[in-house]
Amino acid sequence: MDPATGAAIGSSVLELEKRAQNTIIRHVRYFTNFKNNMEEFRDQLELFEAKIDDIQNRVDVCRQNLQEPSNEVEVLLKQCTKFRVNNAGDLDNLKGLNLEGSVKYFSRYKFSKKAKDLEKKMMRLNVFNINLPMELNPPPETVVKFSTKYLEGLKSVENTKTEIIRAIKDANTVVIGLHGMGGIGKTTLMQQINNEFKEDNPHKRFASVIMVTVSDSPNIKKLQNQIGERVGLNFQGIESETDQRASRLLKRLENESILIILDDIWNELDLSTIGIPRGNGENKCCKIILTTRNRDVCQRMEASPIIRMACLNPNESWNLFESYSGTFESNPIREIAKNVCKECAGLPLAISVVASTLRHDKREYMWSNFLSGMVEHNFEELDGIEAKVYVTLKLSYDHLESHNQKLCFLFCSLFPEDYPIQLNDLMYYGLGEGFVTCGARVSSLDRILILIDKLKSRGLLLDVEGRREIYVKMHDVVRDVAIIIARNDEKLDFYSNFKDLTKWPMGGESETIKRISLMENSIRHVVDHNPKFHGKWMKSLLLNNNYSLETIDDDFFEEMGDLHILDMRGTRLKSLPTSFQKLMKLRVLAISNSYYHKARISFCDHLLSKKDLVVLILLDSRITMLTKEFGELVHLKVLDFTNTRIDIIRPNVLSKLKKLEQLRLLRSFNQWNKSDRNGNFVSFYELGSLERLYALEVEVFDEKFAMSSKEEPLNFLSSLKFFKIFLSDSNNHLAPIHYHDTNHKKILVLKSNEASKSISNWIIVLMKKAEEIQLNGYNWSKQFLGDKILENSDNIKFPLKYLFISCCKTSKVLIEFSKNKDCDAVILPEVKNIRLKELDEMENIFIIPIEIRVGSFQSLTIIFIMRCQALRSIFPWNVAVCLVHLEELYVRNCSSLEVIVIGKDNSDYYNKGQVLFPKLKRLYLYDLQNLKSLLWQQESVKRMEMELSSLMTLKVFDCMKLKRLFFGEKSAPELSMFWCNSDEWFDELQWNDEQAASRFKSIVRFDAVEGRASSRPLKTKRLNI
C-alpha cells in the first residue's frame, strides 16, 4: 500500500471514529438531558401551535375581507395540519408525560429522542418567519344599540312601526321608504326598530342590522367605512378609491342577509356608488330602509312600499307633551299649555323641546307669552324647515336664561351635521369666546357641563350613545334652526354648513363675519380670498380636519388682530404664515401636523408672545426645550403637547402655570426627575403645586418611581377627575402606548422588565379609581381585589371597566373574599373586559365563599386567559351565575386547567346550569391538556344540557381529555360551525342522545381541512343516564 493511500484510509477511519463518537454522545444525551429536552420541546411546541392558530385566525380575517392568503401561507397551513395529524399520538403523549415521576431509562431515551426529532420537523416548517399583528380585533356586533326616547303607546307611531316590520318580513321587499317632515320622529322610530333586533330577532332573518346617517351632503367614504366596519371589512390599500371600495363592499354584502337603514336622505342616492347590493327579494340579500323628508326621494330610489309617517293626533300630542312638561296643578296654565301643544302641530320634536323649555314653570304669564309668540309668527316653510318647527325652536332659544347658554347652543351649529361634539372642544371655544367663564373655585369643565345640561334639559342637545360623558350632538333640524338664527343675528355673524370645499369659499356673505367654521372639508391651500370673509371683525376661525391643508398665504392673518380662536388640528401644515405673529389676542390656539414631516415644525418661538393664551394645543411637533420664559403664559388652563417631542423641561416652568386645569404630555416628555450637564429636568412632584389640575396625561420612565415611598407629594393624583398615567422602568423614549379604550377617563399602565418589583401604596390608591388598568411585570403578591382592600375604600364603588395583567408575580388567587366576612359591596359592577396572561402562580381567579350581591360582574362581556399554567378552574358557581352578559370566553394554553365552572350541590344547580351564560357568543378553548369538563357535576346528578342560546362561534383545539360539552340537540341554535382539529377526539365525545350527536356532526369542521367529517361514518358514545 502506498503512503498516500494509507494516509487517506487513516483520515477516513479518524472521520468515522469522530462521527461514531458524536453519534454515541448524542444518543447518551437523550438519557442525560431528558428533562431539558422535554421542557425545550414543550416550549417550542407551545409557540408552534400558538403561531399556527394565529396564522389561521389571520387567514379567516383575510377571507372575511375578500382577500386570499398567499400560496406560501396556504401550503404552510396544509403542511402544519399534516404534521399535527400524523403525529397527534406522539404529541399528546409527550405533552402529557409527567416529568417529575419515575420514567424508565429506555423510556427516557425513547421520549427524548422523539421530542428532538419532532422539534426538528417543527423548525423545518419555518412558521416563525411569518410576521403577524399582536392582536386581532373581536368580531363586530351584529346590532349596535342606540339610546332613544321612543315612547310606547303612541298609536300612530306604533301603526307605522307595524307597517315597516311587515315590509321587513316580506320576502319580496327590497327597499322600504319612510318619509315625513323634519322633526316628526323618523330617526327615533328607526333606532327603536334597530334596538328591537338587538334584543330579539325571532325570525333570524339578518346576520347584521346596520344604521347610518346620510345627511344632505353624503360622504361616500364615510358611509363605506361605517358599513364596512360593521361587517368586519377594512379598506386598507384603497383608502382613497371609492369605486374599488364599493366593489369590495358589494362582494362582502351580496351573499349576506343584512338590514341596512339609511337615515336622513335628502336627494336620490345611487346605492351602487356605496357598494350596497339591491337583491331580488331572496333571503340572501340586503334589505334597505331609507328615511327622508321628501316622498319623491323614495320614488326615485324605487322604494316599495313607501310609508308616510303622520303627525301625532291631539290626544297623543298631549300625552307626549305632559311626559316632558310634567303635570299641571293650575287649571289656567293647563288650558294655555294645551293650546301651546296644539300649536306644535303634532310634531314630536317641537313638542319635546317646547315642553322641556317650560317644564315646571308655574308662571302663567310665561306660558301666555310663549303661546302669543307661536301664534303671531305666520310664515311659510323656511330653508326646508316646517314653520311650526322653526317657531317653536326659535322661541325655546329665546327663552334660554343667559347669553352664555345661547352662544354655546349656536357654537354647536358650527360642527357638521350629526357630528359627535366633544365637550372639551366646546369648553375650549367657550374659554376663547367667553361663554365659559373662568373662576377660582369652579373648573372650566364644570362650567361647560352646566351649560350642556341646561341645553339638554330643553331638548336642544342630545346624548351620544355610550359616550354621554364625553360627547353631545344636535338633531339635524335643531341644527338647521340654529344656523338660521346665527346668520340672521347681526351681532353674532356665524357662518358654517360649508361642504365639499377644496378652496376658500367665495360667497357673498356679510363683510362683518365674526365666526366661521370650515371644518371637515378638503381645502388644500388658503389663498387671498373674498375680502368679505377677511377682516378685523373675525373672532373664531375653525379649519380643523382639513386633512389636505398644507399651506396658508403669508398675509392671510394680516387684518385679523382680534382673532380669539384658531383651530387647525388635523391639517398638514408645513409652516405658519408670517402674518401669524399679528395674532396677539389669541386665547385658543390648536395646531397639529397630521402629515408626518421629517423636519417637524417648531412653533415654540411663535408662542411666547401670545400672553393671552388660555388653551394651547400643539400636536405632532417638536420642541427642544421649555425654558423659564414659557412659564410666563400664566393664563393657560389647557396645555396639550401630545405627540410633540420635548427634549427638556427645566424646573419651575410648569409650576408657574397656576391656573392650569389640563396637562397632556403623552408621547411627548418622559424624562422626569432626570438631569444633564446643563442642569436638572423638571421633577414630577412639581405638578403637585398645580392646585386646579383635574386632567393629567403623562409618561414616567423611571425604574424607581413606581416603588417610591414619597406618597405625600403625590396625593394630588388621587383627586384627578381624568388621568392617563404610564409608568415604566424602561428608558425607551416615546414608546408606543396601547389603550383598550381612549374614552376611558382614568387609565393606569404599569410596565416593568422585572417581576420582582413591588408597587407602592400611592399606585394602589390610583388603581381603586381607574377605569382601565394594565399591569405588566410587577410583583403583585396580594389579591387584586378582596374584602381587605374594600375595607379601606370608603364605600367607593370600583369604576374599573378593563383589566389586563400579564407576566406578573401574583398571589394564588386574584379576587378573594373571606368566608367569615360579609361584603356589602357590589363587586366590579362596571368591568367589561378581563385579560390575564402568563400569571404562573395564579391557581384561581375568584374565591368568593359568600353571597354575591346582585349587580356584581353585571357588565362583564369578555374574558381572555392565556398561559396561566397553575390555573385549575375559572369560575366558581356563584360567579358564573352572575355573568349574564358574558359574550366571549377565550382560554388558551393553561396546562393545569381541569374545569371551566366549579359546580355546587344544591337543588337549583340543574336548572341554573342549563341557562348559564345566556349571551355567550364566542367560546375558544385552545391547548388545554387537562381540561376534562366545562361544568363540574357529580355522576349521581341528572345530566344537564346547556342552552347557550346566543353561541355563534365555538372552537376547541387540543383539549384531548375533554369528553363532554353538555350540549343537547337544541343547544346553541345559532351555531353554524363547530371547529376542532381532531376527528378522533370528536368521535370520542359523549352525547346525551343520537340527535345531539348527529346535529353537531353536521356542523363540525376540522382545522383548515374541509369536509373530513362527512367522509367518515358516524360514531358516537351515548351516556348512561
Image (spheres, rainbow, N blue to C red):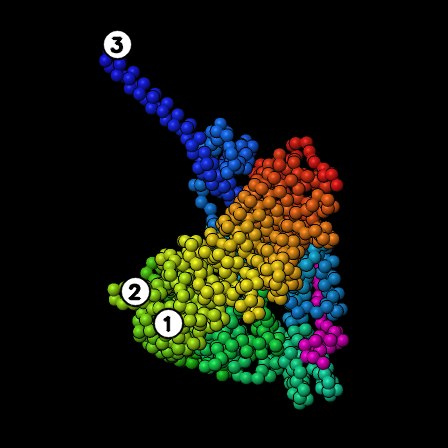
What kind of residue is marked 2? Ser
What kind of residue is marked 1? Glu
Mark 1 vs mark 3: which is more N-terminal? 3
Q: Crowdedness of circle 1 by 10 Å Cα count: few (<14), some, many (20+)?
A: some
Residue at far bottom of view: 365
The residues bearing labels 1 and 2 have C-alpha atoms spaced at a distance of 15 Å
- Residue depicted at 57% across the width and 67% down the height: 797
Q: Nearer the viewer, residue 173 or 747?
A: 747
x and y percent of residue 272 in the render? 58, 54
Residue of label 2: 675
Total numbered labels: 3
899 in relation to 34, above or below: below
Q: Nearer the viewer, residue 23 or 989?
A: 23
202 in relation to 993, above or below: below
Label 1 element class? helix
Residue of label 3: 1
Residue of label 1: 686
Q: Is residue 429 inside the magenta stretch?
A: no
Instruction: Give the residues in magenta.
Output: 298-327
Q: Which quadrant is home to the C terminus? A: top right
x and y percent of residue 585 in the render? 38, 79
x and y percent of residue 548 in the render? 42, 62
Mark 1 vs mark 2: which is more N-terminal? 2
Marks 1,3: beta carbons within 8 A: no
872 in relation to 388, above or below: above
State the image quarter where residue 796 is shown.
bottom right
What kind of residue is marked 3? Met
- Residue depicted at 69% across the width and 48% down the height: 946
